[in-house]
Amino acid sequence: MSSPDLRTAAVVYNPTKVDLDALRDSVTSQSDAAGWGEPRWYETSVEDVGQGVTQRAIADGADLIFAAGGDGTVRAVAEAARGTGVSVALLPSGTGNLLARNLDLTLDDMPDSVRAAFTGTDRAIDLGVIDIEREDRTRSRHVFVVMAGMGLDAKMIDNTDEDLKKKAGWAAYIKAVVASLRDRNELHLRFQLDDGVPKRATVHTVIIGNCGSLPANILLMPDAVVDDGLFDLLLMRPGGFLGWIRVWFKVAWINGILRRTAVGRRITGDTDDDGDLRYETGTRFVARVSRPEEIELDGDGFGKASAFNAWIDPGSLLVRVPQPR
């Protein structure tokens, strides 16, 4: 038993994503070395992907919560920890590791990630919050730590073969992209950004980003900052085959390569809108589509939505990051 005076870490883990024995050894040894109490362990399940066990860990008095799993586990833990003041430490274990990438955390060294959690400092980051309305008018509220999207990206998630994803990792999405590009359906939106004038638009994809970096060196939203109190909005409507080539060149080369360096940013300048990509920033985005469309949060499909109301919750999640060097 831990002394009531010692700080305690809770580990919320997805048993399909982690090597539990190695995780136990690392967390227990680092907890002892840091002078913390005995860690507590909370396993996720199909019925409870993380929110319920995280709430229980907080109720049990956890001072730090490890999110050990894929992006879905991180999103679920963040949803439950939002606004509680309890810190969350990331143990990247999935394919995307989206939030860890955007925070420049170690992705492939679990012992180092555990050590950094016990010796690190807290960083307050923003969360996206979204109310999703279904065709039957029912609504549900969720958070997203990286992105919420409707259109091509959501269809790509829906078309991804999970078995292939386990074997081939991020490369499995290539097949899904090809299948999604065959879908010529466009999104017909009625939307309002903050207190602006309601507008209509026809697009292939709409993405609300809390941060903008994806695997495969893709920087989808180069100006997105995880703690600036704003989200970045991307409306994508490429004009035919050449338009898709321009989008890929801008996202993969200009954003993904050039804009990651100071020299490259001076060369490319600001992120400019063009006929294929339109960027905005804001704190609230309300949209309704002409027919129910697939929607995704942090790379997980959330079914079809007829409308949604998304906003930013500034500084509402504490994430444990390494001490500055």
Image (cartoon, rainbow, N blue to C red):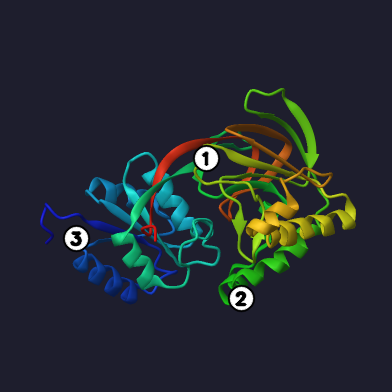
Measured along the vertical axis of the image, is residue 118 above or below residue 123?
Answer: below
**Residue 142, horizontal then vertical, whole percent:** 50, 42
**Residue 214, horizontal then vertical, whole percent:** 61, 59
The reply, left or right, for residue 264 in relation to residue 8 is: right
Question: Tag 1: Cα neighbours inside 10 Å, few (<14), some, or many (≥20)?
Answer: few
Label 3 to label 2: alpha-carbon separation: 38 Å
- What residue sits right under mark 2 in the picture? 168
Q: Quadrant of the C terminus?
A: bottom left
Measured along the vertical axis of the image, is residue 285 above or below residue 46?
Answer: above
Asked whether disc 3 touches disc 2, contact meaning CB atoms under 8 Å apart, the reply is: no
Label at residue 228: 1
The reply, left or right, for residue 2 in relation to residue 245 is: left
- What residue sits right under mark 3 in the picture? 36
Earlier sequence position, callout 3 versus callout 2: 3
Total numbered labels: 3
Which quadrant holds residue 194?
A: top right
Q: Secondary structure at mark 3?
A: loop
Label 1 to label 2: alpha-carbon separation: 35 Å
Q: Secondary structure at mark 2?
A: helix
Label at residue 169: none
- Residue at image coords 61%, 64%: 215
Earlier sequence position, callout 3 versus callout 1: 3
For this rendering, which residue is in front, 159 or 83? 83
**Residue 102, horizontal then vertical, whole percent:** 53, 56
Which residue type does callout 1 highlight? Asp
